[in-house]
Amino acid sequence: MASMTSLHTAHATGGQDRLARIGHARQAVLYGEAGAADAAPALESWIERSWLRCLASGQRPEHPPSFDILPAAETRRHQDANHQLVQAAKPTLERLGRAIADTRYFAILTNQAGVVVDVNGPIDRGDSRADLITRIGTDLSETRVGTTAIGAALTELQPVWLHRGEHFFDATSVYSCAGAPLFGPDGHCAGMLDLTGIEAAERPELKHLVAQSARSIENALTLGRPHALLIRLNWPGRVLGDDTDGLVCVDDDGCVTGANPAARQMVSRLGATADGMLHCSELFAMPFEMLFDAAQRRSPPQGGVLEAPLWTGLRLHALPVLAGREAAPASLQLPPSGDSGRPLKELETALIRKAVSDARGNVLQAAKALGVSRATVYRRLGPGKRG
């Protein structure tokens, strides 16, 4: 019992020290009572940048922030424009609400402008500090309410944690919040997810939770994109079938209709082109028809997984899934490189043989269907095959 009491005392002391350091940083940066460098150990650089932007725009920490709700017509416009975001996020927000039910934190979803479009979790509507920031249509952008996890995530485009006095306004120093940006299947920022507590204990681990939850929402947005084929991607040795997968959606012609952030990081061509139409042949050094064929022939033990070479020379494991079919198992283990899984060359040869068979021996027709030369078909089938 004595050890538990000591632990709680140490935790409380550490919390007070943290608040004292934040207070010193506020005096240094916001009121110029000391050099900003003196406060550096207590202040993240992005927080200082946000504070300085607020000061430059004429805001002062002692002023009351604006929690004005947008006019009804404008709120409806935001709701209509962000309908897909709200629907994609709803299952994640419901899970979050259960996960944080006993922490005095709640979830806020905003669009890319920082306007609230949905909320979830234990919100005390009798507390004006909670009610003001959780009304649909409230503008919580940096220009309206100063430094918060919402404005910071939308500006820095990375997950953030913000505690008490790290908020710009004195009146918002009761909040602690974690935030993460949300990127749509077109590669642009679509909004952000925020977890906020009022006079709650500091919970920096919520930064990890909000980042994971944001990934789930991004994947749901991508899966909602019209597509004929979904390609799940991951590096050799990784497990396919969870939220860490790269997701690429393509139409019947092999054109990319959307991709999640993980896919854009794995395949540089996707990351370099947020706008404009890309074709599978620009991503993978293989005929795109092979991906459709692999999806149609999905079977154990590899579950339709194949090696997909990139034009960079790297290789990914890919699991193509036809639209409308059951998604990948939650824990589909990929065969390691050099294992008994079929090599890419062998798979290509099998697909070429099938194409020739489907074309009733017409090699030229099969080559056109695969998007390869007739010479390639002859070379893979070996000597003696002509047609």
Image: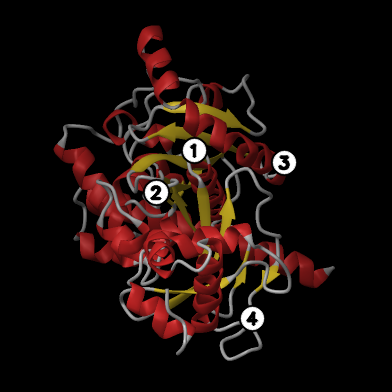
Q: Which disc is residue 98 wearing?
A: 3
Give the label on residue 174, or none: 1
**Amino acid type of the residue tagged 4 in the rendering:** Pro
Mark 3 and 1 residues: CB-CB less than 8 Å, in contact?
Answer: no
| Cα gap from disc 3 to disc 2, whole angstroms | 42 Å
Kindly report the distance in space between the C-alpha atoms of the residues bearing marks 4 and 3. 36 Å
Across and down, in percent, residue 247 comes to 49, 56
Could you tell me which secondary element the residue under label 4 belongs to?
Answer: loop
Residue 198 lies in what quarter of the image? top right
Q: Distance between the residues labelled 1 and 2?
A: 54 Å
Disc 3 marks a residue whose amino acid type is Arg
Reading the image, the residue beneath label 4 is 335
Cβ–Cβ below 8 Å for labels 3 and 2?
Answer: no
> In the image, residue 223 lies at what x, y percent?
53, 44
Element assignment for label 2: loop
Q: Nearer the viewer, residue 42 or 261?
A: 261
Pointer 2 residue: 253
Q: Which residue lies furthest to the right in this view?
A: 1
In-image side of 109 versus 278 (left or right): right
Between disc 3 and disc 2, the foreground one is 2
